[in-house]
Amino acid sequence: MVDVSLRPKRRPDDLVKNKKVSPVMGRSDPQNRIGTSGPKGGGEGATARVKPGSDVYNQYNNDSSYGYYTEEGLYVPADIDMRDGGGMNASGTYYEGGGLLSALGNVFKVRPYGQENTPIEQIGYRDFTDITDRGGPQASGGRYQGGGMISVMGNLLDDLGGVDQGTRTPYVYETSTATPTVTATTQRNYVGSGANPSNAYGYSPTYVSDVFNAPPMPNVANILDNTQFNPPTKTMDEIRRNMAREILLEKYGVNFFTMPEETKEMYMQDELQKMGTGF
């Protein structure tokens, strides 16, 4: 007779790797794939649903690769993470971390996965003004973001010219409607508004046609010839580190901020080394 202590223990059902479970109802998940299976290649604890804050939860939300657990502990597959906006290991109303693809998706207002019911003006760049007012999509002020090397060069020119870029301020929308809340940031004449006096905010969403019909961007050479730059307010080392940081933000999105400090510094040094000593 086999001793009871020698019998293999039965693995709990909730730890069966990649066990299929019912999709989460009431969630914007058109393909019913969020929280239905765990990450491929994960261990026993890497199931479709885990406890928020657990070791598995933290591991997959900080591993610098696509696929993550939501705040409710539901696993989002890697291919969905690539399409749900917000950058790696996050979701949002605009794309981040995909370079040119993200920029085009934001300009053409391609809806991220799960944003089918979000008002169109909150998808990608809100309008042409949003493209040019710094801050990246759905914000104004602060450093240029979301434009790849164009943003990097814009920030470099500002740094060299001692330009005060201000503070990044996200656009604020009322929960009941898509009309922006009246703030110093949003009280302005938006492209495509038509100066309609019946609209108290002077706002209407801008679509792709508005972007292509907008006035041409000013010639960069003319800007440089006719701009009086102030003395640089940053040292060259600070400017180089800012450029490296911008490149990493374009590459990793908001996930860059969640990396351990030593990892961020390692990536920073790699980018600085690529720049060389000539700049």
Image: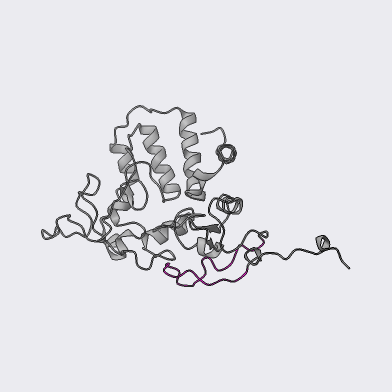
The quadrant of the image that shows the N terminus is: bottom right
Query: Residue, x 35% and y 33% (percent of image)?
Result: 161
* Image coloring type: one colour
Location of residue 179 (image quadrant): bottom left
Looking at the image, which is closer to me, 38 or 258? Answer: 38
Q: Position of residue 35 (x, y in %)?
A: 53, 65
Query: Residue, x 40% and y 47% (percent of image)?
Result: 145
Residue that lies at the very extreme toward the right in this rendered image:
1
Query: Residue, x 62% and y 59% (percent of image)?
Result: 46
Tell whether position 218 is magenta. no
Looking at the image, which is closer to me, 94 or 161? Answer: 94
The answer to whether 163 is drawn above or below residue 46 in the figure is above
Judged by its main secondary structure, the magenta piece is loop
Q: Position of residue 235 (x, y in %)?
A: 45, 27
The answer to whether 113 is drawn above or below residue 195 in the figure is below
Q: Position of residue 136 (x, y in %)?
A: 37, 49
Tell whether position 30 is magenta. yes
The answer to whether 110 is drawn above or below residue 270 in the figure is below
Instruction: Give the residues in magenta.
Output: 19-41
Looking at the image, which is closer to me, 79 or 189? Answer: 79
How many marks overall? 0
Query: Residue, x 23% and y 52% (percent of image)?
Result: 181
Q: Position of residue 126 (x, y in %)?
A: 31, 57
